[in-house]
Image (tube, rainbow, N blue to C red):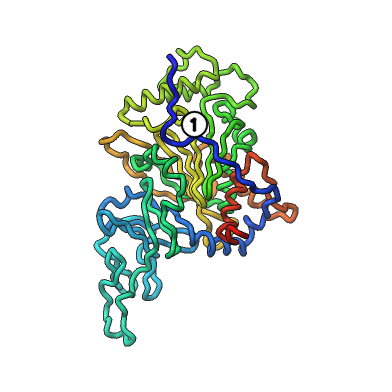
Amino acid sequence: MVVEARVKGTPQEKAPEPLLGTELIPKERYTSKEFMELEWERMWTKVWNVAGREQDIPNVGDYFTTELGPESFLIVREAEDKVRAFYNVCPHRGNQIRNPGMGHAESFQCAYHFFEFNLDGSKKFVPDEDTFTQGVPQETALVEVPCDTWAGWVWFNMNPDAEPLEEFLGVLPEHIDPYHFEKMYIVQDKTIEWDTNWKASVDAFNEVYHVQGIHPQLLESLDDIHVQIDLYERHNRYLVPFGLLSPRYPNKDEITDALQGMLVRAGVDPDEFDGAPEEVRTMMQTAARESTEARGIDVSELNDDQMTDDYHYYIFPSITLNTHHTGVMVFRQRPHATDPNKMYFDLQNYTRIPDGADPPPRPAHTTYKHGEISIGLVLDQDSYNLPRVQKGMNSRAYKGLLINYRERRIRHMHKTIDDYIYGPDR
């Protein structure tokens, strides 16, 4: 029986190719303290950033903190339909209002001098207020930043005149909403301090040119050559076909262990599969759709390729999404506060559950230093390389990144950074 391919939902069309040039990308963009400061003042403080999940603050008074560069932010559900974001700092003497983590509060009281603030950030109580001869104006409040929600995440922007989140996201809601991230629950939550610049981490996941070198085992289960790349205004993506052999793989007739494992996960007994390797993908797509629907998860908005492939989105500047039909692996790449040779890599995995089912328990957030734990074979292979890349970039022998056509997502990211730092009409 021929199954008609679905074309609704996430757009599959190839985006037009912008002209991005071919010059070296200077290494100083990864190693220079001066460039790091330019990024912070002109880019990080002007873009929308992910703070965390709405699911972590379901009730009025629930809050969590998040850190970005030198700043800490306090995210709180102030009303059933209102989430607010504040700098996590008391206006009196600068003490942080809340330690890192999450919790519940009826109000926020600074632990230093007991200044107290309402959930909307306004002043509630100042001890011995009459001793401030200059007075304590009602405007003495937590400093709020623009805040919005999309795809189950809370977003914030340090720019008080920020464009709406919807405008910043551009085409992404049309692309990603069919996955229903808001129905996905976090099942892994780790932060690792990596000895590399945040952009080197983004780069490592924004091209498949390195697969043949660092991840040779993946040649047994994905096509690392016929990858569609789409560059949008700020953001970009590539579509990586899974469930087939790489054209680089030497034995074109072998149903590899990796392909057999994919069949099993799709609900197919590999011993009963008598097709050729190029037929594995179609079989997986049909079986995955049937088994997912049988579990009570509606994937009718997704096309057949989304049943197997990694629709891999980069949300400028810091979010990498490895998107699959019932889950997403999220990387949040955060800059170090002072050192361009370090960064924080937030690794989160999400899974979608049937409507009405009990969500899995939320895992504790854990933090590590570079190399202290395994984060899976593929990511271990990447993270092993990154500090060596950073050291090499600091060499006097190295001038800059020589980027090929298959790596053009990297060049597109740098073009977008420059739009913020120097202006789009430079």
Residue found at x 35% / y 58%: 75
Q: Nearer the viewer, residue 292 or 259?
A: 292
Q: Is residue 244 left or right of residue 118?
A: right
Q: Position of residue 172 (x, y in %)?
A: 45, 44
- Looking at the picture, tell me which residue is in the foreground, 367 or 316: 316
- Residue 230: quarter of image: top right
Q: Nearer the viewer, residue 415 or 202?
A: 415
How would you rate the neighbour count of disc 1 (Cα within 10 Å): few for under 14, some for 14-19, many for 20 or more? Answer: many
Image-quadrant location for residue 341: bottom right
Q: Which residue is mark 1?
A: 309
Answer with the quarter of the image where residue 147 lies: bottom left
Q: Nearer the viewer, residue 330 or 15?
A: 15
Percent of width and height locating residue 291: 36, 24
Q: Position of residue 185 (x, y in %)?
A: 35, 41
Residue 27 relative to residue 162: left or right: right
- Residue 62: tell me if it is visible: yes
- Give the amino acid type for the residue marked by disc 1 in the picture: Asp
Query: In this rendering, does residue 339 appear at all?
Result: no
**Image quadrant occupied by the N terminus:** top left
In-image side of 423 versus 358 (left or right): right
Name which residue lies at 50% across and 51% down. Answer: 318
Answer with left or right where residue 100 lies relative to residue 104: right
Q: Please tell me which residue is depicted at 61% across the width and 35% down the height of the picture.
A: 211
